[in-house]
Image (cartoon, rainbow, N blue to C red):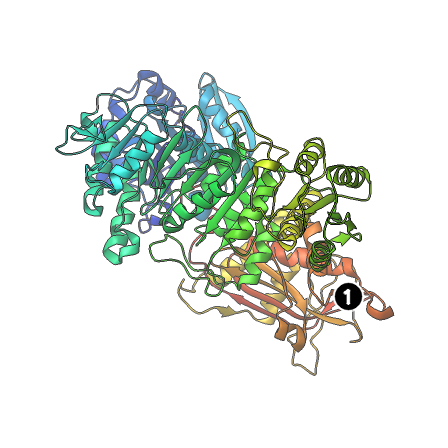
Amino acid sequence: MSGESKREHPDQRELPGGRDYPDQWEADVVLTDGGTAHLRPIRPEDADLLRSFYARLSAETIYYRFFSPRPHLSDREIQHFTNVDHDRRVGLIATIGGDMVAVVRYDRLTNRPGTAEVAFLVEDAHQGRGLGAVLLEHIAAAARERGVHRFVASVLPDNRRMTRVFREAGYKAEQSFEDGVIELVLDLEPTETSVEVTSAREHRAEARSIQRLMTPRSVAVVGASRAEHSVGQTVLRNLLGGDFNGPIYPVHPTAKAVAGVRAYESVLDIPDEIDLAVVAVRANAVHEVVEQCANKGVHGLVVVSSGFGEAGPEGRARQEELVRLARAWGMRVVGPNCLGIANTDPDYRLNATLAPTLPGRGPVGFFSQSGALGTAILQRTAERGLGLSTFVSAGNRADVSGNDLMQYWEEDPATKAVLLYLESLGNPRKFARLARRLSRRKPIVVVKSGRSTQGVPLGHAARALSLPDHAVSALFAQAGVIRVEDLSELFDVAQLLAYQPLPAGDRIAIIDNSDSLGLLAQDAAVAHGLRVRPPVDLGPLADADAYEAALAAALRDENVDAVVALFTPPTIGGYDVRVPEKILRLAAGSSKPIVATYLGFKGMPSDLRINAPDGSAAAGSVPSYPAPEDAVRALAYVVRYAQWRQRPHGRVSDLISAEDRRRARALVSGWLDDLPGDAAPLTATRAQVADLLTCYGIRLADPDPDTGGDTAAAPGSQGPEVDCDGSGVPVRILTSEDPSFGAVVSFGLADETAALLDDRAYRLAPLTDAESAEMIRAIRTAPLLLGHRGAEPVDVSALEDLLQRVARLGDDLPEVARLELNPVIADASGVSVRGVRLLLQQPMGPRPELGPRRLG
């Protein structure tokens, strides 16, 4: 990308003042080709870096930046560019491997309040990698933090790359042309388009970074020991045994060969390019290996070595340094303390794991944080006949996470369903956003350990969750994630999703040759909320023709959405061996899913399998479960997911104007200006609460003389105040800032019974109109709002409106630590808030989702 031009405006000058170094602006970012770079504010000691960087620029790039030839920067210019106050004058640089490869800066214009001129320079060798776009995101975020709301950029018409960066950022822009120069004015207020652009760029970059890891053309095994059963030799033998399609290079300090393959003393001695390095050396030697891989131009690292975050403070520091160094040189890291990665694609056949058993090719992507469980997971996957597209064991999850893999699997045509075994969530809010998008195309099945503690395993680069586990489950469900109880259920659901179509509804038919099995299946279906007709019992002597006729009739029936086929051998005598053939033939041409309990088999038995060319199971294969209850439970999970996909997800209503939202932010910022970040929350006064809620169309009523004034009323944005007479239903609405998920909204009745049972619905803010409607109906006591036993229903639409407004407030303002409306009296005529409490606090840092994209 050619550097963007900049003319010094006559109304611009350096002003006194300054701030401390803003380390919160430092970030690791993924570029469009999957590599990484480090962004940070420029410092005075970067003078030599700037000189070296400038010396590598082409004459054209310099001309586009300064509108004139300028082969060298003077000492005065170097001093000017590297000495900034991080307020009126701000500069950010991008570094790779310690070298500066790009710089962006803004300078405030003194005669145009809230406006700054912005300029870029990107080294020629790194143009086209998305550095300009990501630098614009970060400098814009820094500008907003410092009260700058507009950027002015001057660009030569020939500099199309940089013009495109500004125009495609998604901000509102104005353009003028004068004296042969284009002047662009960008409004830095985030728009729906700018947020979508950032998300799309993040998605493409992170997906590409994982693709580079999963599709290497060559692999080096560093620490490939000659000792049998050692970690390094195990990985090497698994790569060789898996018939990897590219060259494999063992690295050993003294051996000439390992496992019959020529070895090299170091990565740097390998004569060819290396895409992926599997590192299996002592923890204290990993740093040196990473530096060698960086100098060799390796794209990615799989660190199977232990002795990092799981080993205490010293190991955690070693782990942080591993990630810092790898990202600084453009590499992603799987691990450390991991099992490895695998790709069953016949074009690669990559088994860079410690697992001796790798499942065959299939449509399931599997991510596991646990290295210890990884071998067992792969073995159980293979035993069930469930095929995988790709597998990643992240270990301590210091860098590559489940979020990265979801970005990759969304675009991977070989992956039909995603399985996640999670012990922690590094960026839960991002997980929810990505999962919601991916779930609309491909199902995600999750086992999340730590239900009782919400703790984080030693070594994981993540914080413990503060929400109760049932709230986490609710947030997963909001995103369409299928959360199951354990690994057995994970595989039960996966084998159905992988090979059978999704059901159109919840109407189930049961066909059996044992009335006992049929009744068990019927009871299970009712317990799981499925609509089921009485089982069709064919009797113990039923032959293949009877099964074929009954199954065909069920599949033709418009009132049946899925079929459970139960077949057990009779107590006396043999059975018709053609039964599975008939089931399989009908399943292959059906748009309705079929699950079976067939002779007690678990998984994808050969009798019920349609074989792909490589012998693995193909679409249309029928999964079998050892018990009817298992089959029905798996089907129930999939039915709920299919219903989630079919439902309208709604939209975030445009209830609040941009002007009112800006006014709300200004109010909160003013109240907290003098409050330290670590101070206790500030309890807002009634007047402050009234001012803030008014920005969101919620008006407080006159104080109740019996309670001393902590009361409010909240009808719609402009309608007349509603004053309920106390005969309605009291409810409680709460938005609170969770350190992991951001703004979380809860809803429930405002009484002791609801509190005792914790009958609350939880959702992430903001809420769509559909989500607010679902939230009200999600609590067990919802019938009391909807006309229980002939009572008049409350005005549910008014409640939905209030929920959306409160959720939008919480989403807009991270400083709102807690806003509780309790009680809100709902009746047929509307809603009235009778109590309100607002706690404000400086956030510990920006929400990951509100800032520019970064690796976290």
In front here: 210 or 175?
A: 210
In front here: 621 or 163?
A: 621
Q: Residue at 45%, 16% (x, y): give it.
A: 158
Describe residue 687's horizontal placement relative to residue 357 as left or right: right
Q: Position of residue 455 (x, y in %)?
A: 42, 62
Q: Furthest residue to the left?
A: 254
Marks counted in the figure total: 1
In front here: 639 or 790?
A: 639
Describe residue 683's horizontal placement relative to residue 780 as left or right: left
Q: Furthest residue to the right?
A: 790
Describe residue 447's horizontal placement relative to residue 567 as left or right: left
Q: Residue at 34%, 18% (x, y): give it.
A: 68
| Image quadrant containing the N terminus | top left
Are there few (<14), some (14-19), or many (20+) residues within 10 Å of tag 1? some
Is 680 situated above or below 657? below
Is 67 situated above or below 259? above
Q: Is residue 511 visible?
A: yes
Q: Residue at 18%, 31% (x, y): give it.
A: 266
Q: Position of residue 847 (x, y in %)?
A: 47, 51
Is 548 situated above or below 758? above
In front here: 466 or 839?
A: 466
Q: Secondary structure at mark 1?
A: helix
Is 274 situated above or below 672? above
Describe residue 784's horizontal placement relative to residue 488 as left or right: right
Q: Position of residue 765 (x, y in %)?
A: 59, 54
Q: Is residue 852 visible?
A: no
Q: Position of residue 77 (x, y in %)?
A: 26, 31
**Which amino acid, mark 1?**
Pro
Q: Residue at 47%, 40% (x, y): give it.
A: 382
Residue with the mark numbered 1:
783
Q: Furthest residue to the bottom?
A: 706
